Image: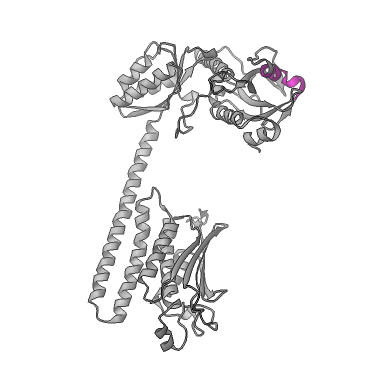
Amino acid sequence: MSTLRDLAEEHTHLRPADIDHLHRIAGDWQLLSDLSFADLLLWVPVDADGTFLCVAQVRPTTAPTAYQDDQVGRIVGGPEVAHLGVAYSQGRIWREGDPVWYGDVPARHEAIPVRLRTAEGEAGEVIAVVGRDTNLSTARTPSQLELNYLTTADDLAQMIADGTFPPPRHPGETTSAPRVGDGLVRLDAGGKVTYASPNAQSAYRRLGYASHLVGEDLAALHRRLAGDPLDGTEAANGILAALRGEAPPRREIDARGATMLTRALPLMPAGVPIGALVLVRDITEVRRRDRALITKDATIREIHHRVKNNLQTVAALLRLQARRVSMPEARVALEESVRRVASIALVHETLSMSSDEAVEFDGIVDRVASAATEVAATEVSVGMRRRGSFGVLPAEIATSLVMVLNELLLNAVEHGFPPADEADEAGVPAATPGLVPVVVPEVDPSVRPEVVVSAHRFRKMLHVSVTDNGRGLPPDFDAERGSRLGLQIVRALVTGELRGTIELRAGANGGTEAVLVVPLARSAPDGRSQA
């Protein structure tokens, strides 16, 4: 299904500013639909002959719809849209006419012209028409609530025709707001409550106000109810701003352990301030869950922070022990353990600063790669480069993968680019352990030693390669039977913890390439996959 913008750009000559205004209407018109108990259809003229295109539709949550089928994308002309032509050409709300039938559903047509105000604040030309179509099959004598809904809906409809609704959105403000059914309060021009729906009355009672709202000065009431005087003042100022014709941002009021979200809208049909509409919602349980999540999140991050500190302590102890060991082999083994523990600590350090159990892995890889070149036992200066992005990885994948990459990067630097005397003594070029025996080519001395880490995602799989342009694989080495601890750790983590595959092979242009394929979707206990 094409979007509002796609349809408008393809079939009309509306300006970008006009289309943006239509988007604002479509983003805020659920309010008008619920108050009207009617479907709203946004029509734009296609040709000068009176043909209109429906670019958006919303159904009421307070009444049955008049349309079972979606109308977006429908192009209609002739007598069926004559009421739209009147509203568009004459710039007035059209309400006359007899009910019409859609199949076996009787409906009442109305048409509201849509204007975009000019930079000078004046009403501009009509750019579209909102069709308000009410299902009459369940018509009955309206209650006091319904009468107040319909009266408020007519005021907002006139404001659409004037170009003053919807109000501009404040920077950073979300689209979340109370709905009509959550609670509605109508104020007169003096700020006194003329009507409050039962749900609105209940929301205020949660805040500690047990009396009836009708006749109360709502701004003064907000100031009295709020537990924090500053919050009370801001809430009261929001009501006063709406009475002046402004559109204040949404506010929250906290009192007696309850929280209420409010949205105040000015009512200015024909440019005359007649009061305000205040929508309220009791969000006490929502905020309680938010606070519980914040507490849980802080606890988890503190745990990761302590784990990181403990791992760094372990690494420091191993480092001290390595300095006291006289056997070179034992010292090397301890230093390797220090690097492995430090790589895991990097993941927990990142998780301690994250809001969830996932990490941006690119930064971790860059730090591990930098550390590999600094601590590797080689006299050659090796460059490190990352190509592609790992993206965000869950902690359970990141912890194992960082150890695997740490081992592969160290092997690539130390064994792909060993000191010249070490290779000469061995009689063969030293290289990263691999699976495929090959004849090792001579390394071009003019080529800068480099290790490249590449990553990309494809079909819920993470493909990673660690490639060097070093001396390549030794001719007599089989990775499956290799005895080096680093390679054993890599194989165990990749095939066990990560449930992936690894292959070490000769690079296309010399050197060695380690290729990993790791699934990003993990299996749940019931056998189903989890993203």
**Residue at image location 42% in from the left, 83% down from the top:** 420
How many callouts does the rendering have? 0
Tell me where residue 484 appears, x and y as whole percent: 41, 78
Q: Quadrant of residue 30?
A: top right
Tell me where residue 168 appears, x and y as whole percent: 50, 27
Tell me where residue 19 appears, x and y as whole percent: 61, 30
417 or 406, nearer to the observer: 417
Report the residue that reaches farthest toward the left.
324
- Does residue 248 show up? yes
When the figure is inspected, residue 41 is found, relative to residue 172, above or below; the finding is above
Q: Is residue 515 magenta?
A: no
101 or 153, nearer to the observer: 153
76 or 85, nearer to the observer: 85
Principal secondary structure, stretch drawn in magenta: helix
> Which image quadrant: the N terminus?
top right
Query: Magenta residues, as a range?
Result: 77-88
- Does residue 208 show up? no
**Residue at image location 47% in from the left, 80% down from the top:** 481
Q: Is residue 4 left or right of residue 190?
A: right
Q: How is the image coloured?
A: one colour
Report the residue that reaches farthest toward the front.
446
Q: Is residue 77 left or right of residue 321?
A: right
Tell me where residue 90 appears, x and y as whole percent: 67, 15
**Residue at image location 31% in from the left, 21% down from the top:** 225
When the figure is inspected, residue 98 is found, relative to residue 22, above or below; the finding is above
